[in-house]
Amino acid sequence: MNWTLEVVPVPVTDMDRAKAFYTEKVGFKLDLDDEVAPGVRIIQMTPPGSRCSIALLQGMPPFPGERAMAPGALQGLQVCVTDIEAAREELTGRGVDVSPIRHVGATGWEEGKGDTWNSFMSFTDPDGNGWMVQEAPSELSAR
């Protein structure tokens, strides 16, 4: 049996502002924006080429036994690209405040690209949810 990660909830304060950020600035594809029950809205978006989506939720109570995340509490969610420099140029061109490209070196985080699997950049959404972008050597289907 496969266990696939399909959707990650991202806590935000303003659904429409977050939707605009992720679709217009980051380039995610809008899959769904619907009121699925009275007062419960779900916006689901998918990064280009990804098998996993993110969901913005409004009015949905936490699942029994779970706690709600505060807006901005999600940190370290990671996506991979095959050309980190092109991805950074695309994001900055759309107005996203992106960190410099960094790698893990002998003294910790150092500026510039590293070897295979060791090039990263980061950005945050309007609520402070933190994202990492990592350069992968090939598309997921080829790994």
Image (cartoon, rainbow, N blue to C red):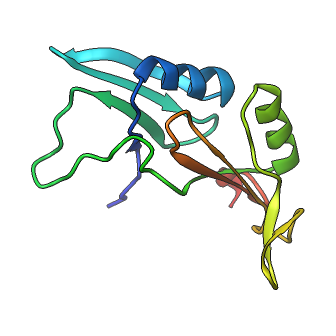
Residue at 86% x, 41% y: name it: 86
Q: Position of residue 110 (x, y in %)?
A: 83, 70
Task: Classify residue 61 by image quadrant.
Answer: top left
Q: Is residue 83 visible?
A: no
Outermost residue on the bottom side: it is 106
Q: Position of residue 50 (x, y in %)?
A: 57, 41
| Residue 62 shown left or right of residue 5 in the figure | left
Q: 96 or 78: which is nearer to us?
A: 96
Task: Classify residue 125 by image quadrant.
Answer: top right
Q: Is residue 117 above or below residue 127?
A: below
Q: 82 or 64: which is nearer to us?
A: 64
| Residue 56 shown left or right of residue 17 in the figure | left
Quadrant in which the C terminus appears: bottom right
Task: Classify residue 126 by image quadrant.
Answer: top right
Residue at 40% x, 45% y: name it: 6
| Residue 44 shown left or right of residue 39 in the figure | right
Q: 38 or 31: which is nearer to us?
A: 38
Residue at 86% x, 71% y: name it: 115
Outermost residue on the left side: it is 64
Q: How many marks?
A: 0
Q: Position of residue 55 (x, y in %)?
A: 40, 34
Q: Is residue 139 visible?
A: yes
Q: Position of residue 103 (x, y in %)?
A: 80, 68
Quadrant in which the N terminus appears: bottom left
| Residue 143 shown left or right of residue 40 in the figure | right
Q: Is residue 136 above or below residue 124?
A: below
Residue at 15% x, 14% y: name it: 38
